[in-house]
Image (cartoon, rainbow, N blue to C red):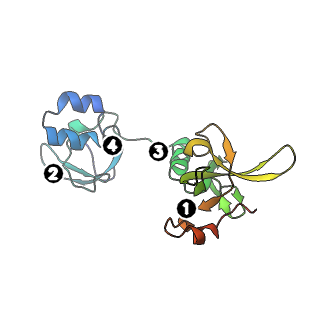
Amino acid sequence: MKYKVGDKVQIKSEEWIYNNVGIPHVLAYLLEYAGKYAKITRVSKSDNPKYRIDIDYGEFEWFDLLFEENTIAETPTLQDISKTIREQNLGVSVKEEEGKLIIEPLKVEHDLPVDTPVMVKMPNDEWKLAYYAGELKTQSGEILKSTWVRGYKSGQGFGSISQTHIIPFDKFDPNNIEESLKHNIVKP
């Protein structure tokens, strides 16, 4: 038995799986987890032990040869955690101070966090999903509400654009636009 319950392992790469697994339905299953890290949750005691892992909820039996040799995964870095938080739109920022992880709410503009999913009204009167970018100050001093360009979130796109109608996604009802407009954060 090479691994014990609680060990973190990395599943082999897509390339390795393509070159070494010949059973189509097993190949498709393994490719879903290629390169990912998992924790051993159960081990069968035998000469050729089989493992159950957390990321597939113990559904499949895994063997030593399916894990990378440098098996014990490193703890995710602060950058990994920050990336996950941004991608999952958790509304918080992460930083490290004196070896501690500090998680704080993102900058809030009138009770709406930056990167909050919103619906915006397009010039053709269609509604489109976007992410809130905060306030923009024009050269004349006017304050405009904006969303990220092309549906990106902060740090992903090419800037932001002002909008005349921004409604938080959870307040938007496509079947009742009149009611949804009551939640427009852009004040006329």
Q: Residue at x 55, y 57 (%)?
A: 90
Q: Which amino acid, mark 4?
A: Val
Of the residues shown, which amino acid type is indicated by label 3? Thr
* Of labels 2 and 3, the one closer to you: 3
As measured in the structure, the alpha-carbon distance from the residue carrying label 2 to the one carrying label 3 is 28 Å
Instruction: Report which residue position mark 1 lands on.
Output: 169
Whole-number angstrom distance, CA of label 2 to CA of label 4: 18 Å
Regarding mark 4 in the picture, which secondary structure is present there? strand
Residue that numbered label 3 is attached to: 75
Tell me which numbered mark, 3 or 1, is placed earlier along the sequence: 3
Does label 2 or label 4 sit earlier along the sequence?
A: 4
The residue shown at (21%, 55%) is: 59
The picture places residue 167, in percent across and down from the top left corner, at 61, 62
Tell me if mark 4 has few (under 14), some (14-19) or many (20+) residues whose alpha carbon lies within 10 angstroms of its own.
many
Q: How crowded is mark 1: few (under 14 residues within 10 Å), some or many (20 or more)?
A: some
Callouts 2 and 3 close, C-beta under 8 Å: no
Q: Which residue, given by chain and number where applicable, does mark 4 sit on?
A: 9
Q: Mark 2: which secondary structure?
A: loop
Residue lying farthest right? 140
